[in-house]
Structures are given as C-alpha cells and as structure tokens.
Image: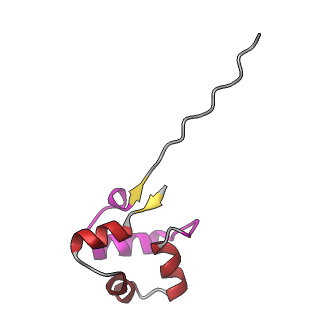
Amino acid sequence: MKLRIDEILKEKGKTKYWLYIQLGLSYQNFNKIINNQTKAIKFENLKTICDILECTPNDLFDIYYKPKSEAPSEQ
C-alpha cells in the first residue's frame, strides 16, 4: 500500500510546499508521509489531507495485492 499524495498534488496543480504549509506538520513527519516512509498515519492527519485535497481516503491510497504462495502439494 502506498500514498498517492504526490500524484494528486500534480493533478491539482499544487506543490508539496503548498500542502506542507496547509497541514502544519513538522517537516520530518510531512516528508515521511509524502515519501511513503511512514508505517502509520493518524486519522486526524488523514482527514485533514483529504479535506485539503478535496478527496477521499480511497483516492489517497494505491493498494497492491500479493498472491499468497501456494502450499506445497502433499505426495
């Protein structure tokens, strides 16, 4: 799973700096979110990002499914 914030910003003609100012997070936390280097994101921050970008959480995430490896066959 990864965040699509950078793609959404490009679609809307906005910059990372613009979002950084709007969010009011520390630069370290903001940078981790933007670069998909965070393992967790507060619901409050998620809602704020959605409000600012006028999108839903579904718009923010790309989800990749890995197929489960098949169990070894019994012989």
Q: Looking at the figure, which quarter contains the C terminus?
A: top right
The number of numbered discs placed on residues in the rendered structure image is 0
**In the displayed structure image, the side of residue 75 where residue 29 appears, left or right:** left
Colouring convention used in this rendered image of the protein: secondary structure
Q: Position of residue 53 (x, y in %)?
A: 28, 72
43 with respect to 9 (left or right): right
The answer to which image quadrant residue 5 occupies is bottom left
Q: Main secondary structure of the magenta part?
A: helix
Relative to 52, 40 lies left or right: right
Residue for point 36% across, 73% down:
49
Whether residue 70 is in magenta: the answer is no
Residue at x-position 45% and y-position 74%: 34
- Left or right: 37, with 47 as reference point: right
Q: Measured from the top left, where is residue 12 in percent x and y?
A: 22, 72
- Report which quarter residue 22 is drawn in: bottom left
Spot occupied by residue 46 in the image (x, y as percentages of width and height): 42, 70
Q: Is residue 15 above or below residue 71?
A: below
| Image quadrant assignment for residue 69 | top right
Q: Is residue 41 magenta?
A: yes
In the image, what residue occupies the spot 50% across and 67% down? 36
Q: Residue furthest right?
A: 75
The x and y percentages for residue 67 are 54, 35
Residue at screen point 56% across, 69% down? 38
For residue 11, above or below residue 13: above
Q: In the image, which residues are magenta? A: 37-60
